[in-house]
Image (cartoon, helix red, strand yellow):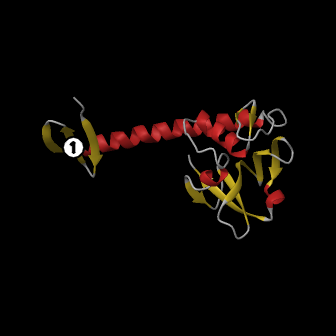
Amino acid sequence: MITKIAIILGCVTLATPTTPTIQATVKPNVVQQVDVVQNLIRASQRTKLKTAVKQAIQRVHKTSYVFSGSTIYGWDCSGMVRWIYEQAGVVLPHSADKQAHVGVRVSEPKRGDIVAFAYKGRTDFYHTGIYLGEGLILNANREYGTTVIEPLTNFRRSEIRFIRVL
C-alpha cells in the first residue's frame, strides 16, 4: 500500500489508492519545525560548498581541461561547476547554458556563486565558472588547458550573469 503525504498551505493530505482523501490542519509549530530543518540543511550545504570551492582551488594547474569531464582528473567548465556543487549535495546539469538558468540571478555575487558568460547580444551561455570574490573566478579554461583563477575583466567582451544556487 502506498501512502502519499503533501503539505499544502497548512493542510496535510493523506491518500492511498483504496481510501478517500483525509485533510487535517497542521499545527503552526509543525510548519515552523519544517522551516528550521530546511534552514539547517541549507546551512550545511553552504558549508560544504565553501569546502568544495577550497578543494577546487587546490586543483589550479593540476586538473586539466577535458571536454565533457566532471571529475578532479579532468573537467570542462560546466563539469567543474557541477563537481563543486555535487560536493554540497546539489546536482546541476552538465551544460554552461543550462547552469546559467538555474538558481536565482543576483547582481552582487558571493563566493561560490556561478558565473555564466554569453556573447554580447546572445541569450545562450558558452562558459561557466565559480565566483571567488574581488572580481576573480575559478574556471576550467579550454584555452589554457587547465583549471585557472582569472579576473572577470578577461571576459569584458561577454555578457556576465551571476547565479546563486545556495
Give the residue type that dot 1 points to: Thr
Nearer to me, 71 or 59: 71
Q: Secondary structure at mark 1?
A: strand
Nearer to me, 140 or 55: 140
Query: Outermost residue, front direction?
Result: 67
Query: Outermost residue, right direction?
Result: 144
Q: Is residue 95 left or right of residue 21?
A: right
Instruction: Tell me residue 15's x, y (percent).
Output: 19, 39
> For mark 1, what is the residue?
13
Q: Is residue 41 left or right of residue 5?
A: right
Q: Is residue 38 left or right of residue 21?
A: right
Q: Residue sitting at 50 percent across and 41 percent down?
A: 42
Quarter of image, res 22? top left
Q: Residue sitting at 60 percent across and 52 percent down?
A: 98
Q: Quarter of the image containing the N terminus? A: top left
Q: Would you say residue 26 is visible in this rendering? A: no
Q: Residue sitting at 34 percent across and 39 percent down?
A: 33
Quarter of image, res 20? top left
Q: How many marks?
A: 1
